[in-house]
Image: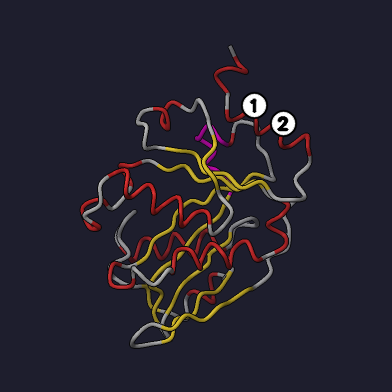
Amino acid sequence: MIHEKIYSSKQLKTENETMLVEGPLMSNELSNYHFHPDLVAFRPAPKQFEALKEIAELPEGRIYVARTEDTIVGYVTFLHPDPLERWSTFNMEELIELGAIEIAPDYRGYQLGSTLLEIAVADSNMEHYIIISTEYYWHWDLKGTQLSIWNYRKIMEKMMSAGGLKPAPTDDPEIMAHPANCLMVRIGKHVSEASIQKFQRLRFLSRSTS
């Protein structure tokens, strides 16, 4: 069952301007804004903007953005796991993935990432979902931030905790490929015990299929 999406927003003031963190936004609403050209962590900015618009139109898709008056400078996405990924094995409708979170370099340091996650889970309907985020160190901006792997992970964990996500063990081979990698999880208050048990089997899929 896909649950209703409830809009939330919050203003943040920086030295020079007022930022708005809001969502979830639909594709036509995203089209009202420019997309910051430095949002290139996953693909060139124009293609990433088109990808966000596509996700926004999915029944379960949720896009939250941080923006100036007319420019999106950060975003977070939520959608069902990719059908080719381990996490879609049981086709759990109540399982959604934090697919991407990105802040333009010039706008880091204002807690936009944490605020995006806070706004996302402010939607009471998120309590019906298990939210996961698969964190792989090779996706982290170690070069741009000049942080070590472990210091980056500390900052990432602190940011994720703003949305209630915490590290959880798993036997997923990609996550186990490096000790800095981790699975982050938030289980909503209204998720059934049956779904929690199914997710437990999913986290330890090798064990349950052996």
Residue count near mark 1 (Cα–Cα under 10 Å), binned few <14, some 14–19, many ≥20: some
**Residue 26 percent coordinates (x, y):** 57, 70
Dominant secondary structure of the residues highlighted in magenta in the image = loop
The amino acid on which the numbered mark 2 sits, given as a three-letter code, is Gln
The amino acid on which the numbered mark 1 sits, given as a three-letter code, is Arg
**Residue 89 percent coordinates (x, y):** 60, 31
Please state if 89 lies on the left or on the right of 51 as rendered: right
Q: Residue at x 51, y 66 (%)?
A: 116
Who is closer to the viewer here, 138 or 3? 138
Q: Which residue is mark 1?
A: 201
Who is closer to the viewer here, 165 or 209? 165
Please state if 179 lies on the left or on the right of 193 as rendered: left
Q: Which residue is mark 2?
A: 197
Q: Quote the CA–CA distance across marks 2 and 1.
A: 6 Å
Q: Could you tell me which secondary element the residue under label 2 belongs to?
A: helix
Residue count near mark 2 (Cα–Cα under 10 Å), binned few <14, some 14–19, many ≥20: few
Please state if 8 lies on the left or on the right of 182 as rendered: right
**How many labels, in total?**
2
Q: Is residue 82 magenta?
A: yes
When the figure is inspected, residue 128 is found, relative to residue 195, above or below; the finding is below
Q: Residue at x 51, y 60 (%)?
A: 54
Who is closer to the viewer here, 104 or 51? 104
Range of residues picked out in magenta: 80-87
Q: Residue at x 61, y 29 (%)?
A: 202
> Do residues under tags 2 and 1 come within 8 Å of each other at their CB atoms?
yes
**Residue 128 percent coordinates (x, y):** 73, 52
Quarter of the figure that contains the C terminus: top right
